[in-house]
Image (cartoon, rainbow, N blue to C red):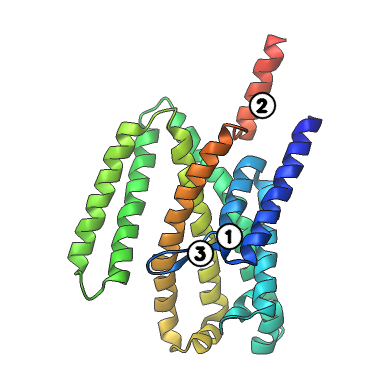
Amino acid sequence: MKNEKTYELVLTALFTAIIVIMAFTPLGYIPLVVINATIIHIPVILGALFLGPKKGAFLGFVFGLTSFINNTFKAATASAFVFSPVLAYNVVGASGIFKSLYICFVPRILVGVVPYFIYVLIRRALKSEQKTGPIVVNALASLILFISVRAFLIRLLPETLSALVCTLIGLAAGIVLMVVLTISSSKKGSTNIALAYAGLAGAFTNTLFVMSGIFILYKDAYAQAVGVAGEAVLDVIMGVVTFNGIVEAVVAAIIVAGVGFALTRVKPIYSKSERMMDMGKTAAKI
């Protein structure tokens, strides 16, 4: 028990250090062809998986704190105030303090909570003796890929590809993924699939809660900051969700699945019920 606590303390400190380093250096971003994909949330997701949702929430808080510091003291963009209560006070008054605290911290804390439960849910579904579990999971993954590819292509190449062509390409990608997952779905492969879902869920949690918070709490101020009309804010936000959000979610799914699977060789991921079952088996042997 003591060794377990020491291990978790060391791992928490390690993930915290990685988050801080990523936040204050260019290491927190992966340059792609069209955008720089943010990956600062990946240590939070991995921390949630291997340390549980409580420590994951702490790591999410650290992520939010680095965002607060960066946007307060650097303010690289005109919309930095949405993540900084200090700047928000100057923009919209005292109410901005609470609005920016929500946007800066709540989505990031949830990034340290949601992936853990998604992982447990997907693992349970894939390990189920019923065939409907894997079918539903595979179908959901294929649907997400279809929607993502279609939205990404429409956003990236609006003048080159028609909506119909983008839909057909997205449909083809979804069908291919469905076939691959159906063939590869097994108890041995359930860990990888669940890890990928956890990465996907963590990245989307951050994007969706941040952007929806901006729309609900800062619609007019955000429109003024980015130089668009108030009625165009929703289009801007949907553009971020369907473009940056999709790219970052896919990147997170790949990295979390790869790094997470390597880490499981050292420390398996246990849900509370699995841990209790293992303890019961050990006690029975004794």
Question: Secondary structure beneath disc 3?
Answer: helix
Mark 3 and mark 1: Cα distance apart in space: 12 Å
- The amino acid at mark 3 is Thr
Q: Residue drawn 42% across and 54% down?
A: 250
What secondary structure is marked by label 1? Answer: loop
Question: Which residue appears at 42% of the width and 77% of the height?
Answer: 236
In the rendered structure, the answer to whether residue 124 lies left or right of residue 242 reads: right
According to the picture, the residue beneath numbered tag 3 turns out to be 207
Quarter of the view holding residue 135: top left
x and y percent of residue 221 in the render? 55, 86
Report which residue position mark 2 lands on.
Answer: 276
Q: Residues within 10 Å of mark 2 (few under 14, many from 20)?
A: few
Q: Earlier in the sequence, mark 3 or mark 1?
A: 1
Count of labels in the image = 3
Identify residue type, mark 1. Answer: Ile
- Ranked by sequence position, the earlier of labels 2 and 3 is 3
Circle nearer the viewer, 2 or 3: 3
Give whichever of 183, 24 is nearer the camera. 24
Label located before the other in sequence (2 or 1): 1
Q: Where's the C terminus, which quadrant?
A: top right
User: Relative to residue 47, is residue 4 depicted above or below?
Assistant: above
Alpha carbon separation for disc pair 2 and 3 = 34 Å
Q: Tell me the mark number nearer the camera, choosing from 2 and 1.
A: 1
For residue 100, above or below residue 270: below
Q: Report which residue position mark 1 lands on.
A: 40
Q: Nearer the viewer, mark 3 or mark 1?
A: 1
Q: Are marks 3 and 1 in contact (CB under 8 Å)?
A: no
Mark 1 packing: few (<14 Cα in 10 Å), some, or many (20+)?
A: many
